Amino acid sequence: MARKPRPWFWTQRGEWCVTIEGTRHLLGTDKEAAETEFHRLMLDPNRGVSSESVAAVIDLFLEWTQKHREPRTYMWYRYHLQSFLDHLKPKSLTVDRLKPHHVDSWIENMNGGDSHKRG
């Protein structure tokens, strides 16, 4: 389990730093200003979220699946993810704007019957 991020003083550089989701951020030499910057970074709602389109991310996933999984697995993912993309509005939706209701709406409109639902 990863540690919770918290500022620490990097003696060799003489600066305060923090590591958030694997990325080191320099916060400055003043402890109080570093604390303020740390809190700003932690409150950023888009921290670590891609602004690529959902379609682009799905394409990358399908390329990987085609190379590393059985053809039948690739076809299954391609069929279902294409159905999701066809349902998605707007078509240019980015990952940072994708919300659970987009997926819920797609699932509710599927014609697959009970085999496509959990529980």
Image (cartoon, helix red, strand yellow):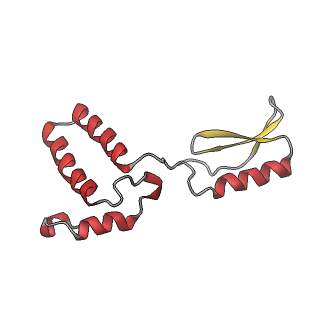
Question: Residue 74's x, y, as percent?
Answer: 19, 41
Apparent side of residue 71 relative to residue 99 in the rendered image (left or right): left
Residue found 32% across the figure and 45% down from its top: 58
Question: Residue 27's x, y, as percent?
Answer: 76, 43
| 10 lies above or below 53 | above
| 21 lies above or below 101 | above
Depth check: 45 or 25 in front?
45
Apparent side of residue 93 relative to residue 20 in the rendered image (left or right): left
Q: Find residue 101 and report its image quarter.
A: bottom left
Depth check: 17 or 1 in front?
17
Residue found 86% across the figure and 45% down from its top: 30
| 21 lies above or below 118 | above
Residue found 29% across the figure and 69% down from its top: 105
Q: Find residue 104 and report its image quarter.
A: bottom left
Apparent side of residue 31 relative to residue 1 in the rendered image (left or right): right
Question: Residue 55's x, y, as percent?
Answer: 33, 47
Quarter of the image for the C terminus: give it. Answer: bottom left
Depth check: 89 or 29 in front?
89
Residue found 80% across the figure and 28% down from its top: 12
Apparent side of residue 55 relative to residue 110 in the rendered image (left or right): right
